Amino acid sequence: MSLFAPLRELNVTQRHTVLASFLGWTLDAFDYFLLTFVIVAVAKEFGVGKAEVTYALFLTLAARPLGALLFGRLADRFGRRPILMLDVILFSVFELATAVAPSLTILLVMRFLFGIAMGGEWGIGASLAMESIPPKARGIISGLLQSGYPCGFFLAALANWLLVDHIGWRGLFVVGAVPALLVLYIRRKVPESTVWQQQNAQPRRSLLESMRGQWKLAFYLMILMAAFNMFSHGSQDMYPTFLQVNLHIPAGSATAFMLAALLNLGALAGGLYFGSLSERIGRRKAIIIAALLAIPVIPLWMYGGSLLLLGLGAFLIQVMVQGAWGVVPTHLNELSPDHLRGTLPGFAYQMGNLLAAITATAQTWIAQRHGGDFAWSMSLWIGAVAVLLALLTWLGPEARGVGFGDVKRSS
């Protein structure tokens, strides 16, 4: 049977829900990654160093747990659908506000507020989708949802390539307000989760009551997601800067766009393949295999020596990085109890982001102490994190196929 056969089990309403969740994460990531392409331009305009601008990335990542907790609790109480719409509007508004920031300080504040809004989207969108589909479709849908992140990166690369020379870095952030239109689609086509409706009929519990007996799991998921975020952000955030500084490839050039396109094609392929594979071999095995296979790809990715080999390396590294990530939405949602599914997966994810938020700044610091060599710092980082991620995953639990709501555990 094909790895993608479960997609045929989805009805029209389920497909709308999955598409809305996918687009939400895609457009959220698009807004986030726009900054990574214009770090040099922003630093030049405000007269500061590149490392100072990377604090905007740090603040965005650091703010995301606040958003995950705030919007996650709201989603557990008032429903996935209305809070998802609110969240999309807010991150679009703060993206637009970034475009008119008169100083680096104001820009940093706007990116922090954007991070709060961004932090809520993933957990709500993933829980809404996972609660709306058949259990056997979770693996492939998990890979599809997480592929929204590299799709957002690709759209940011495309916008940068086509528009930055015409509208500047500020104009890119104006374009970043477009995701607000997604709310119209959600309002018209996406119903509320039936699992949430069942849970909402139960007596309400406070956060502390809800977390009783779940603290050990929550702590483990936070550490696991820290490794995941160091893996993805370590391979992506400073990649455009690596191209500019080490390879002297301009950010808005066709070459930079081609490499970004190959990187994101690899991410799409990896997320879909390993997400689907996890339905057969298990969530943990799929993650471990993808993480460890990233290590032998590192020399090709950073030291390919030719454009062709660098492109192949960019493709393959993201097959592995996003292959591991493709399992995350279903893995975290299956490990979370019904009454915490709007909060715990997203909060654990974003707390992992907080713990990993120093990634871009740390890689820049390491590179500066090795003659500005981003290839060396990024290679060292990814190799170490791949081993850590595989170990943490091997030590943790798994709940593949667990039933949601009133449905008993599937076989």
Image: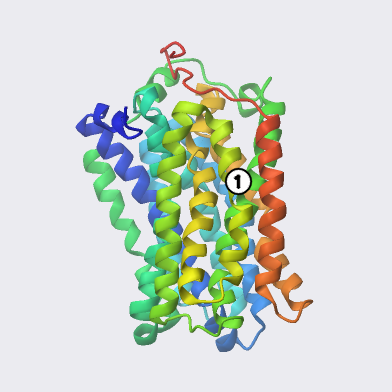
Residue that appears at 63% across and 46% down: 292
Task: Report the side of 85 relative to 283 (left or right).
Answer: left
Above or below — where is 215 with respect to 374? above
Residue 140, position as x, y percentages in the image: 38, 36
Residue 161, position as x, y percentages in the image: 38, 77
Above or below — where is 86 with respect to 98? above
Q: Quadrant of the N terminus?
A: top left
The residue beneath circle 1 is 291
Scheme of colours in the image: rainbow
Residue 228, position as x, y percentages in the image: 61, 47
Residue 380, position as x, y percentages in the image: 72, 62
Q: Nearer the viewer, residue 83 or 189?
A: 189
- How many residues crowd around disc 1 within 10 Å: few (fewer than 14), some, or many (20 or more)? many
Q: Nearer the viewer, residue 295 or 154?
A: 295
Task: Report the side of 110 relative to 389 (left or right).
Answer: left
Q: Is residue 124 visible?
A: no
